[in-house]
Image (spheres, rainbow, N blue to C red):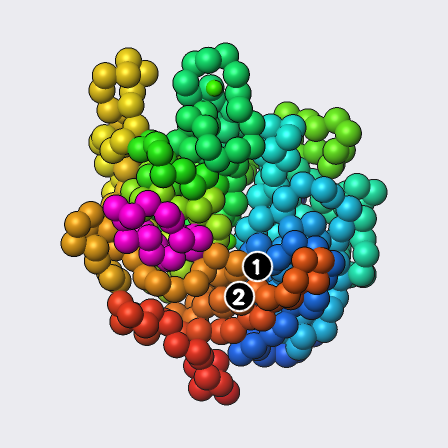
């Protein structure tokens, strides 16, 4: 049966590719998951988001123009620098061992997912442009909505909030998380990207969060190095799904998006909205199994201008505080500069502080409490099984 080895070869190669991520034994994970961690002080803008490699024992912080890698013991393992765009929220993909983050170049009308091979980030000051650690995939769908000339005057008004332009008020992208297709808790994990949405109280078509889902299994051929002088447009023309969650207008949309496997629930951390008709909560959630339903996008005119646009709408989770006037649910819980569930009802939440050019992040591990007024309480060592 000399066929055996040859027949097995594709399977072996496939297994070799898919299961390529295995953290070095003894690296990072020698320390237990910390109850608190400081993400360093950096001459950047504020911390935007975090990602946690639970198995490998690393925490990643996006400081907008710098990515910092710490191990669980608090040792700085490496930093990645050298881009001028806005690196926002992150997530760690345990399938390939890479960190995925939103990356915006609004002046170039270019929006990317940065795909960072963090397993090879082992020194301070690594330059993204001269290293193939840092790859990017363009998102045409976001560029289309961001640049939409909504009032049809032939002029796209650019990166300003006070304009009728930008479909759904899209200011770009920020929240990023892997999780199941909306409507289910099982199945393949999709990369989910949330729009930034400008705060603008004078329009009605910006009261939804917009979430795009992508199957990234064929993304390798889109990935390109970062060349800021010549922004590329290599990326998927189609999305796997586009969904809308009515939260009321916020200030810059979903800052942090995260899937909590232990609760089978998506969380969206925002900066407070400014429309007085809405409760303007800081944290919203959608349950994984809640079916998206095709329905009216309240406040969004369709192309004829006389009807209401339709889309796949996902109702908010039936939990937390409730606003009687709008029926909107949510929590007054900070989750906008680093929010990452790590299993067993535990979630890291970031506090940002500092002044311009000197920014730090203090991470605390919280346990889900589930009380509308107090969704989270600080975790203790007994929560970690110590
Ligand atoms: Ca216009
Ligand atoms: Ca995230």
Whether pointer 2 and pointer 1 mark residues with C-beta atoms closer than 8 Å, the reply is yes
Q: Identify which residue, 189 or 159, lies in the foreground.
A: 159
- Residue at left offset 47%, top offset 22%: 148
Please state if 234 lies on the left or on the right of 347 as rendered: right
The image shows residue 281 at horizontal and vertical percentages of 33, 56
Mark 2 or 1: in front is: 2
Residue holding disc 1: 50
Q: Which residues are magenta?
A: 267-286
Residue 143 versus residue 37 in the image, above or below: above
Q: Is residue 18 above or below residue 207?
A: below
Disc assigned to residue 350:
2
Disc 1 is placed on an element classified as strand
The front one of 319 and 249 is: 249
Name the residue rendered at 48%, 61% in the picture: 339
Q: Is residue 128 left or right of residue 359?
A: right
> Is residue 284 magenta-colored?
yes
Query: Residue 80 colored magenta?
Result: no
């Amino acid at each position: 049966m000399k066929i055996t080895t040859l027949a097995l070869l594709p399977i072996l190669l496939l297994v070799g590719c898919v299961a390529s991520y295995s953290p070095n034994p003894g690296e990072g994970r020698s320390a237990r998951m910390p109850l608190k961690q400081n993400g360093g002080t950096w001459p950047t803008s504020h911390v935007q988001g975090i990602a946690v490699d639970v198995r490998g024992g690393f925490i990643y912080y996006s400081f907008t123009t710098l990515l910092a890698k710490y191990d669980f013991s608090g040792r700085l393992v490496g930093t990645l620098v050298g881009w001028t765009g806005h690196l926002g929220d992150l997530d760690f993909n345990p399938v390939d061992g890479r960190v995925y983050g939103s990356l915006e170049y609004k002046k170039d009308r270019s929006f990317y997912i940065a795909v960072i091979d963090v397993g090879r980030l082992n020194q301070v000051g690594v330059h993204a442009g001269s290293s193939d650690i840092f790859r990017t995939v363009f998102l045409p769908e976001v560029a289309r909505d961001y640049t939409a000339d909504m009032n049809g005057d032939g002029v796209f008004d650019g990166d300003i909030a006070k304009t009728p332009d930008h479909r759904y008020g899209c200011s770009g992208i920020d929240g990023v998380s892997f999780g199941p297709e909306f409507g289910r808790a099982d199945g393949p994990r999709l990369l989910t990207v949330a729009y930034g949405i400008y705060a603008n109280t004078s329009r009605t078509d910006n009261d939804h969060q917009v979430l795009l889902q992508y199957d990234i299994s064929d993304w390798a051929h889109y990935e390109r190095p970062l060349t800021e002088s010549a922004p590329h447009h290599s990326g998927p023309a189609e999305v796997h799904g586009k969904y809308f969650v009515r939260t009321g207008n916020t200030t810059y949309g979903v800052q942090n998006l995260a899937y909590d496997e232990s609760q089978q629930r998506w969380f969206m951390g925002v900066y407070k909205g400014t429309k007085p008709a809405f409760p303007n909560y800081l944290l919203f959630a959608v349950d994984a199994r809640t079916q998206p339903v095709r329905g009216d996008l309240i406040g969004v005119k369709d192309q004829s201008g006389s009807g209401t646009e339709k889309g796949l709408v996902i109702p908010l989770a039936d939990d937390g505080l409730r606003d009687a006037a709008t029926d909107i649910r949510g929590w007054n819980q900070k989750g906008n500069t680093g929010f990452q569930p790590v299993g067993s009802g535990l979630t890291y939440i970031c506090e940002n502080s500092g002044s311009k050019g000197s920014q730090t992040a203090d991470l605390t591990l919280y346990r889900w409490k589930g009380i509308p007024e107090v969704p989270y309480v600080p975790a203790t060592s007994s929560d970690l099984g110590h």
